[in-house]
Image: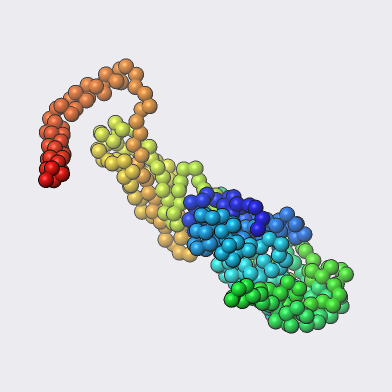
Amino acid sequence: MENFDYYEVLGISRTADKESIKKAYRKMALKYHPDRNPDDKEAEENFKRINEAYEVLSDDSKRQIYDKYGKEGLQNSGFSGFSGRDFSDIFGDLGSIFESAFGGSFAFGGKRTGNEGKYQLDELIGVDLSFKEAVFGCKKEITHRYKVACEDCKGTGAKDGRLNTCPDCGGKGQVFMRQGFMTFAQTCPKCKGAGQSAAENCPKCKGNGYAMREEKFEVSIPEGIDDGQRIRITGRGNADKNGKRGDLYISVSVAEDEVFVRDGENVYIEVPVFFTSIVLGTTLKIPSLRGELELKIPPNTKDKAQFVFDNEGIKDVNSAYRGKFVAQIKITYPPKLNAKQKALVEELQESFGIESEPYKNLFEECFAKIKQWLHHNKGEKDS
């Protein structure tokens, strides 16, 4: 195994939960996916690393071994990582992992069928949105590079389109590897799961089976879309040998806001309130998603108390429902008092401090209970 840290590869802390791991993996996988970085060896290596990191950290037992014993512990338990293996082998083994993280049917393993040729027709790309763009919706211009079948080989990658049954997998699209008493299936590295291979590579596309084209178009981002959700654009994916195009899936990554915190359709804001306003009660104007709201704070409100405004949150992307807007109180105190302020506080303290009524009686009752508890414990020890 290469010497790199799985948490650093995904850019997460060692206490990250599964959802954070999945989110980080999705973002990194989209960034370094080979379809978005053709002929980029560095991106290919990074893609291998993040897949290896995700396979370990998304598995509770593997993660526990890694956290306690490191990569050496994983090696001793039979996990060998992906270092030194063929890259197509990665695609096959990690198809289920990639599919579970993204959802949908972006399968990389197994035998390819139909007229897809050497590549999938459906395509997945990522788009970054600001918090505001996601909440209110927007228009985004997309620049997309997609595949079209090579005219000379009709997408097969073989000279004159001549294919033979793959000698490595016998046409099955998969090869099998035995490790101890277990047998693992993986995509055939020679034919990439097609079951057929070229006797001679097409000179025009060098065996890839496709050429790249670029297009620009505008996409409507719906109001209320959330991080990790996808938009399907029909007919904007890769093209097969007949010119028919698959679908383009856009995975959304939403930036966090400096003031508002989103939880689904609900939005939270922390409202700092000076301690004197808490004692007396007050009414404040607070910012919301669509303007100002009036927040009435009763006297002696507790720290972290929440006030809920219905239908002031984010619209559900699939319905007319709007979530809640929640204001949470944060009691604040002056960092320093001048002489006049200190005198006023002392005067206030004298008016109802710990030596005055009714607080004096409360403290005396509290201390009396503690004395009884200590006396009872002492009696049990002496006996």
Residue at the (45%, 57%) spot, across then down: 264
Lateral position of residue 279 relative to residue 285, left or right: left
Q: Judge whether 313 appears above or below 88 on screen.
A: above
**Residue 305 x, y percent position in the rendering:** 31, 45
- The one nearer the camera, 123 or 63, is 63
Residue at the (25%, 33%) spot, across then down: 280
Residue at the (15%, 44%) spot, across then down: 381
**Residue 222 x, y percent position in the rendering:** 54, 59
Image quadrant in which the N terminus is located: bottom right
On the question of residue 374 being in view, the answer is yes
Query: Could you say which quadrant of the image residue 302 lies in?
Result: top left
- The one nearer the camera, 80 or 135, is 80
Lateral position of residue 339 relative to residue 182, left or right: left
- The one nearer the camera, 188 or 118, is 188
Q: Judge whether 314 appears above or below 202 on screen.
A: above
- The one nearer the camera, 146 or 244, is 146
On the question of residue 143 being in view, the answer is no
**Residue 313 x, y percent position in the rendering:** 42, 53
Task: State how the image is colored.
Answer: rainbow
Q: Residue furthest top?
A: 339
Query: Could you say which quadrant of the image residue 93 lies in?
Result: bottom right
Q: Residue furthest front?
A: 383
